[in-house]
Each structure stands twice: as C-alpha cells, then as structure tokens.
Amino acid sequence: MLEKFFDLKGHGTNVRTEIVAGVTTFLTMAYIIFVNPDILSTTGMDRDAVFVATCLAAALGTFVMAFLANWPIAMAPGMGLNAFFAFTVVGMMGFTWQQALGAVFISGVIFFILTVTGVRRWLIAGIPISMRSGIAAGIGLFLAIIALKSSGIVVASPATFVTLGDMTHTGTLLAILGFFVIAAMDALKIPGSILIGILVVTIAAMLTGVSSFAGIVSAPPSIAPTFLQLDIMGALTVGIFQVILVLVLVEVFDATGTLIGVAKRAGLLTEGPQHKNKRLGRALLADSSAIVGGSLLGTSSTTAYVESASGVQAGGRTGLTALTVGVLFLFALFFAPLAGSVPAYATAPALLYVAVLMARELVEIDWDDVTESAPAVLTAIAMPFTYSIANGLAFGFISYALLKTLTGRWKDVHAATWLVAGLFVLKFAFFTE
C-alpha cells in the first residue's frame, strides 16, 4: 500500500529508507516542541496547551505535505515568527495573544490566496537575493538577542542599553555549556544535536537545582486554553496592519525558500527560474493551509522546516518521510511533563545556535554593490536593535528603493519591492504602534 501510494520505486527508495529519513528529520527539528511553548508562554498562553498545539500543528502540516504533495518536507511552527508573535506583537505592541492568533489566521488566508493566484511566486521573483539574505540573517540576529537575554548573558544597562550579565550564575553557565554541546555535536554530524543539547542542559539544571523535575510521560494535556481562542475581529485594527504584512512577507520568503531548497536537494525540481514541477504547487498549498490550521489550534505561523534537508540527506524522497515525522510528533504529545521541565536556560542555547545557522545567509549578499549590501545590512541589524522584525523589513525595503533611485537605477527595482516599500512608508506615515 505504501509503495503504491507514495510511488517509492519511482523515486528510487523503499519503506526502510523513508522511515529512517523521517526519524532523522524529526530528531533534528524536535527541539521546537520545547522551544515554542517556552516562547509563546511569555504572552500568557497556557504552556501545556501550546505544547499540544505545537505537536498537532506540526503533525497536521506535515501530513498535508505528505499526502497532498508527496514530498519529504516536514512542517512546524517557525522560529523567528514565534519570537515576533510573542516579543513584538504581544510584548511591544500590546496586542493580546488572542488578537495575535487572529492576525496569524488572517495572514494564513492571505498567504493561501497569494499562493492560489500565483502572486506568491511573483513576490519571490521580485525580491532581490541580497534582501532575502539580509532578512534571514536579521531574523537569526533577532533570535540571538532573545537567547542572550533569556539566558542572562546579556542584561539591560542604563548607561549602554545592554551589557554583560552575571557570568557566574549557574543557569547562565548551563546555557553556555548547552551552546557548545550543540555546536560540537553538529560539527560531528550527530543527528538531533539541538534536541540532545536541550535535554543535556535540562538534566543538568535539575541536578543543580535550577529547575525541577516534573516527570517524563503522561496523557496529553488539554488544548482547550488555546483551541479556537483566536480573536479575528480584534485583530482587524489599524495597528495590526504591519503585523499581517510582516507575517505574510516572512512566510512567503521562509517557506518558499525552504521548499525549493530542500526539494532541489532531493532532486524533485527541475533547474530553472520557474522550478517546474507539478507537485510544487501542491506543496505551496500545503504550507499555506497549515498556517490557518495552526492558528486555530493555538500557535504561531507554521512553516516548512529546513531541517528536512537532514532527512533528504538520509535518503528521504517521498511523502512517507513526512508521514513518519508527523506520526512522531503525535507520539511526542505524551511527553508534556518533560517539556514542562525544560527551563529557558535549556532553550536559549538552541535559539542561539539556530541564529548562528541563519547568519550564514550573509554570504549571499552582493558586497560589491553598496545599493544591494547596505539595505540588506540595515535589515539585519535593525531587527535585533529595534527588537522587531517589522522594523528591519521596513528599513531594508525603503532604503533599497531609495538607494536605487538616488543612484539612477530605479528601473532595477522590481514592482514587488516598490509595493512592499510603499506599504511600509504608509505604515510609518499613518499607522503608529
């Protein structure tokens, strides 16, 4: 049955290879079941309910990818977007988490429409590579400052805004240990290095009294505190305009780039600007519809995970790999006590290491052309320094259009870039947080 449905022979694979690939992918991305509740619970959301929503949203999105697109790509709530949800939309802008979930739902609907109408591909084609790289790196830097703050490595200072924290604090030392454990294991190509690092620090935190042991396995907690709690009407306010714009833009760049990148590595796409493949359209529909499902369950935007490349490297070529990942996320529902035992000092090194990986995008910037590099760098540095992905995007797109115009190269600016820059100008001119 599996052979026929997923066309394993046609893709040069078998059941054993696909399952091993699925397990590999799950191990590399399972850290999200600990990190996402830790981040979103800062908004007042019930941590256990977010844990369940995270597992279910990941399983749902991955199942859709498996059965609709038959691609070996897994999905889960995205890193960066969850931080934007918690620390910018709720923390800085003052929206309730219910309104933020409403914004995620609206962005998912818009994302779905953009996908169906083909506008999504037009947007991707119109955003310069340097800007896309700056956005990815900037989100990484945004995660980095969150990690440094939550671990106590960086603290507030009235004189210099930020300064070095107490490096003798046990929790801070454990976070530093966790980072090096993760980095070393990843360098040694050990699968699940981030997950293992989180567990190592969690155990060490329990042994040193930094956190308490709440158990390992239990029946799944109730999802009621977050299920269908989104406030769509409350999200339809003037101030939410930039929130939805940012969510849609990041979802477009992040998800599409991941899908195309992983699919090309798996040999599922033909070369060329259009990336022609009959299943690409289905994959694009799968990830856009998963965002809507995740918002209903009670989590931030769901997206395709670049960690899927580890499963592809292990031989995964079909939706059976994704199906395996989805099933494992369902099994993870029974580990809620363990997730509740994970302290911020254990998730911080995971965030910091993901930031390091995302910062690699800086190499893709065209450093020989200042009209390309300057906007990309402004995008990247504005995100952590203003504590907002939205401001980073605004600085980047507006400066890109201005620099190209001032140097007589306004014709080099794609209509999509002009559109996004114009929307951010309107935001600064008429809408305030």
Image (cartoon, rainbow, N blue to C red):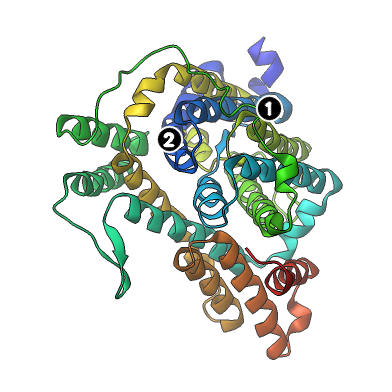
Q: Residue furthest top?
A: 1
Q: Is residue 382 left or right of residue 101?
A: left
Q: Secondary structure at mark 1?
A: helix
Residue 226 or residue 420, whichever sits in front: 226
List x then y, in percent, for residue 402: 68, 83
- Precedes in sequence: disc 1 or disc 2: 2
Q: Position of residue 424 (x, y in %)?
A: 70, 69
| Three-letter residue code for mark 2 | Thr
Relative vertical location of residue 402 with respect to residue 227 in this rendering, above or below: below
Per the rendering, the mark at residue 255 is none
Disc 1 to disc 2, C-alpha distance: 20 Å
**Disc 1 marks which residue?**
64
- Left or right: 228 as drawn, with respect to 384: right
Image point 63% across, 78% down: which residue? Answer: 399
> Is residue 201 depicted above or below 367 in this figure?
above
Q: Is residue 37 left or right of residue 214?
A: right
> As shown in the figure, which amino acid type bears the numbered disc 1?
Val
Residue neighbourhood size for the residue with mark 2, other residues' Cα within 10 Å, grouped as few (<14), some (14–19), many (≥20) = many
- Which quarter shows the N terminus? top right
What kind of element bears circle 2? helix
The quarter holding residue 433 reads bottom right
Q: Nearer the viewer, residue 82 or 88?
A: 88
Q: Is residue 318 visible?
A: no
Q: Which residue is mark 2?
A: 28
